Image (tube, grey):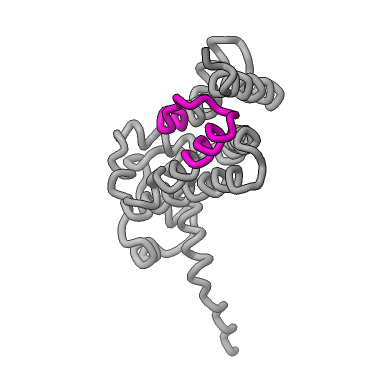
């Protein structure tokens, strides 16, 4: 009986399967808690594929970080690259962070693990994981708001970026401890929506030009 022809290989699909498995596993257990064998078993591929497409366990981990950063960077630039006013752009950015973190819990978990590692892998990953490309665009938006009179002129762009990320990130990074300590369910979309509205109010009460005494 003639053998059935083998299905044509799809290298990009195999690479995506490995990367998806790596993101899922590294987010759950961190770099040291995951083996290459587990990644390939989850992706249902041969072990040599990891080394073929990525070269090493550390390289696929860095690729996982790169991928989740690429996703959030898309949200960030989309929020600011519009014709709206600086305030509208910044509000869209805050909303974008909340939506992204809701839809991408692995981003929060990977960053928590990477901070436990004191940023060791991000430091080796180079430019793709840098905040510099976006911080330039963020700073331009702040400058635009200052020139138009919408925003106060004494804002520190780097610290403001920390504030934007921190106010949104904590709803996911500290979800369980805060839910228990404050007796509110931060996993409830309605509760997070209320939090987002307060974040927006706090931010713009603080950075608007009229707020400066």
Farthest residue toward the right? 190
Q: Camera-side residue: 101 or 34?
A: 101
Q: Which residue is rendered at x = 63% and y = 14% of the image?
A: 184
Q: Is residue 50 left or right of residue 1?
A: left
Question: Residue 125, image x and y in percent?
Answer: 32, 50
Question: Residue 124, image x and y in percent?
Answer: 28, 48
Which span is picked out in magenta? 139-162
Residue 198 vs 103, above or below: the answer is above
Q: Camera-side residue: 96 or 148?
A: 148
Q: Is residue 36 left or right of residue 5?
A: left
Residue 10 vs 131, above or below: the answer is below
Question: Residue 121, image x and y in percent?
Answer: 31, 44
The count of marks equals 0
Residue 181 vs 102, above or below: the answer is above
| In magenta segment, residue 155 | yes
Q: Which residue is rendered at x = 28% and y = 40% of the image?
A: 120
Q: Main secondary structure of the magenta part?
A: helix
């Amino acid at each position: 009986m003639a053998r059935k022809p083998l299905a044509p290989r799809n290298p990009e699909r195999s690479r995506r399967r490995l990367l998806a498995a790596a993101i899922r596993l590294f987010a759950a257990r961190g770099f040291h808690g995951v083996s290459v064998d587990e990644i390939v078993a989850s992706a249902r591929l041969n072990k040599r594929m990891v080394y073929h497409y990525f070269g090493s366990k550390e390289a696929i981990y860095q690729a996982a970080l790169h991928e989740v950063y690429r996703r959030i960077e898309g949200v960030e630039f989309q929020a600011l690259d519009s014709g709206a006013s600086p305030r509208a752009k910044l509000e869209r950015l805050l909303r974008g962070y909340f939506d992204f973190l809701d839809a991408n819990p692995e981003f929060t978990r990977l960053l928590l693990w990477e901070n436990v590692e004191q940023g060791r892998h991000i430091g080796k990953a180079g430019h793709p994981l840098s905040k510099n490309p976006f911080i330039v665009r963020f700073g331009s938006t702040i400058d635009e708001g200052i020139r138009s009179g919408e925003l106060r002129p004494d804002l520190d762009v780097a610290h403001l970026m920390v504030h934007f990320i921190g106010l949104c990130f904590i709803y996911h990074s500290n979800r369980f401890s805060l839910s228990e300590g404050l007796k509110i369910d931060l996993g409830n979309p309605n509760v997070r929506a209320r939090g987002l509205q307060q974040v927006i109010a706090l931010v713009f009460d603080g950075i608007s030009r009229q707020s400066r005494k």
